[in-house]
Amino acid sequence: MFALHRICALTLALVICLNAQPVKRDADELLEHISTLKTFIGTAKCPDHIHLHSPFNIKKDCMSSARDCTIKMLYDLKSKCNITKNSTTDEAINNVILELGTEETNPTSSSPDCKCEMYNKTGVDQFLKNMEVQAEQLNSMQ
């Protein structure tokens, strides 16, 4: 009987400790999905002239707007590169969009400093690199 009480107490202590220390798995999953997208984007037939607004050096109060911008640019990427629905590349983009959509950030700012158009346009490769930096920045804010 004493052993059962001890197991229950240790289990309770473990649950309390795990709840007290949130696991930052979302950003890790986001980085993994971005890495997968970087691998498969090469299979897409993207024209050389594609340039996308690419959030970088994001202010804390602009994180939500930057996330929304990145999602919008990912949809643009899908259409401009004629990515086939249900292809591996399409799935990779959808996974990044889903992960970005689950990130908790401040409400979208209406400040002109946070508009998508304020960010420089970059090529696809730089856009994906900047997305990794954005994911790390989101992780550091949690």
Image (spheres, grey):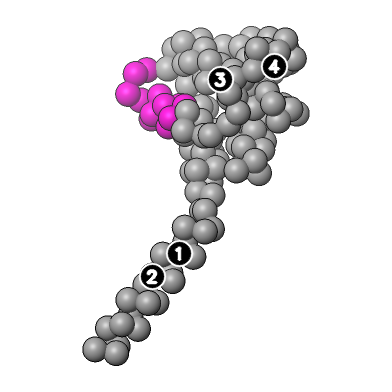
Q: What is the number of the mark on residue 16?
A: 1
Q: Secondary structure at mark 2?
A: helix
Q: Residue at x 74, y 27 (%)?
A: 59
Where is 45 relative to 95, above or below? above
Residue under pointer 4: 114
Q: Residues within 10 Å of mark 4 (few under 14, many from 20)?
A: many
Looking at the rendered image, the quarter that the N terminus falls into is bottom left
**Can you give x and y, in whole percent of width and height, for residue 4 in the image?**
27, 83
- Give the CA distance from mark 4 to mark 2: 44 Å
Lower sequence index among marks 3 and 4: 3
x and y percent of residue 12 in the render? 38, 70
User: Which quadrant would the C terminus be assigned to in this image?
Assistant: top right
Magenta range: 84-98
Badge 3 density bin: few <14, some 14–19, many ≥20, Cα 10 Å:
some
Residue 39 in sight: no
Camera-nearest label, 1 or 4: 1
Residue shown at the point (50%, 48%) measured from the top left: 25
Most distant residue in the left direction? 1
Is 24 positioned to the left or the right of 1 in the image?
right
Q: Label 4 is placed on what type of residue?
A: Cys
Q: Is residue 8 magenta?
A: no
User: Of the residues under marks 3 and 2, which one precedes in the sequence?
Assistant: 2
Residue holding disc 3: 68
Q: Mark 3 falls on what kind of element?
A: helix
Q: Position of residue 96 (x, y in %)?
A: 48, 31
Q: Are marks 1 and 3 in contact (CB under 8 Å)?
A: no
Callouts 1 and 2 close, C-beta under 8 Å? yes
Separation of residues labelled 3 and 2 (CA atoms): 40 Å
Using residue 62 as the reference point, say whether residue 16 is left or right of it.
left
Q: Amino acid at mark 3?
A: Asp
Q: CA distance from mark 1 to mark 4?
A: 39 Å
Which residue bears the numbered disc 2?
12
